[in-house]
Amino acid sequence: MPLPIRVLLLSAALLLAACAGTEAPKSPPPSQLPPMPHPADNPPTAAKLALGKQLFADPRLSGSGRTACQSCHYREFGWADTKALSRRDDGNLNARHTPTLYNVGYQTAWYWDGRATTLDAQILAAWRAQTGADPAKATAIINAVPGYRSQFVAVWGGEATPETIVKTLAAFFRSFVSTDSPWDRHEAGQRNAVSQAAVEGQALFAGKGRCVACHAPPYYGNSTFFNIGLEHGKANPDPGRFNVTKNEADRGAFKTPTLRSVAISGPYFHDGSGITLKDAVRYMAGGGHPDPNKSAVLQPTGLTEAEIDKIVAFLESLTSTEPWQQPTLP
């Protein structure tokens, strides 16, 4: 069964348990991620991924020639950035925090509100809005670079087009998999891979904290949407998922982010209001702000500060350590 379906089914079961007032299971399935699914018309190849890596880091794709995809997504920051709100190519602030690109290929809805229904659609929209590009003009610039033109001919059989640029980036983004973390190694039998605090934190994460109701392994997040009260009391609250569905039940709801490598991708939440990981865990453990549309699954857990520290230790153990080398641009 494909991962998104398995995760959704497990999350639904955990959500029902949480809403019924029962504890979530204390032994969730192992964290091992399955193979990344790829569209039949866009299989990954070494040459395509190398090309995608260059495009990811190249500001020539942007309207100003100064902004690359990488301008908001850094490996050392969990493929996010350190800003509550990043700036677009035109200098204006975004309304929401930069989401991680980790495990983006496993998702079934993109953006915090899920308005993009394919990864390709999300990339094209960000290319236009975030980097301020006219895709046709940017493609002409790429084709004028001999080193790019030859690669596109080798990978796609012809010069670059906006579609093949998007597909190349999508294939590259699917390679951003946060796996082989200390916790993955612990579950594989390497018992010295994590601390005792992390082991106890995982038990709290799955039990008393009820975190798995929304953050079930192996992805530790999914393409479902919850209102956790963050917009409560704001002068101009962000409607979130409501903007997509026009369903009042979705007002103030945002997508559940992955918690893999979350320890290096702060600040947290869609508005970047969680400064530290402990701040974010403490907020969730406390049941969030009393928004009238707040999801029923989010309730005070009674976790102590010491227990919150242990959950943080567990989340830190979900950090992967794959290397990153900056590409040389043609």
Image: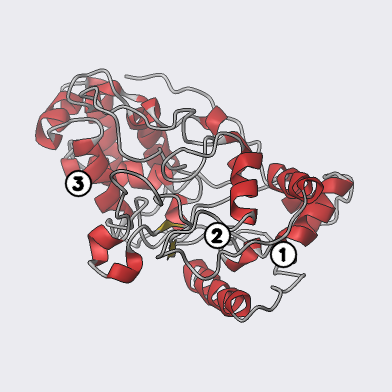
Which secondary structure, mark 3? helix
Nearer the camera: disc 1 or disc 2:
1
As drawn, the label of residue 206 is 1
First along the sequence among labels 1 and 3: 3
Nearer the camera: disc 1 or disc 3:
1
Q: Closest to the observer: 329 or 321?
A: 321
- Check if mark 2's residue and mark 3's residue have beta carbons within 8 Å: no
In whole angstroms, how far apart are the C-alphas of marks 1 and 2? 24 Å
Left or right relative to 139: residue 278: right
In whole angstroms, how far apart are the C-alphas of marks 2 and 3? 25 Å
**Residue 217 visible in the picture:** no
At x 36% / y 45%, what residue is drawn? Answer: 234
At x 32% / y 24%, what residue is drawn? Answer: 58
Q: Closest to the observer: 195 or 300?
A: 300
Q: Closest to the observer: 18 or 11?
A: 18
Classify mark 3: residues with Cα within 10 Å, few (<14), some (14-19) or many (20+): some
At x 28% / y 45%, what residue is drawn? Answer: 236
Classify mark 1: residues with Cα within 10 Å, few (<14), some (14-19) or many (20+): many
Q: Amino acid at mark 3?
A: Glu
Q: Amino acid at mark 2?
A: Pro
The residue that label 3 is drawn on is: 163
- Check if mark 1's residue and mark 3's residue have beta carbons within 8 Å: no
* Quadrant in which residue 200 is drawn: bottom right
As drawn, the label of residue 35 is 2
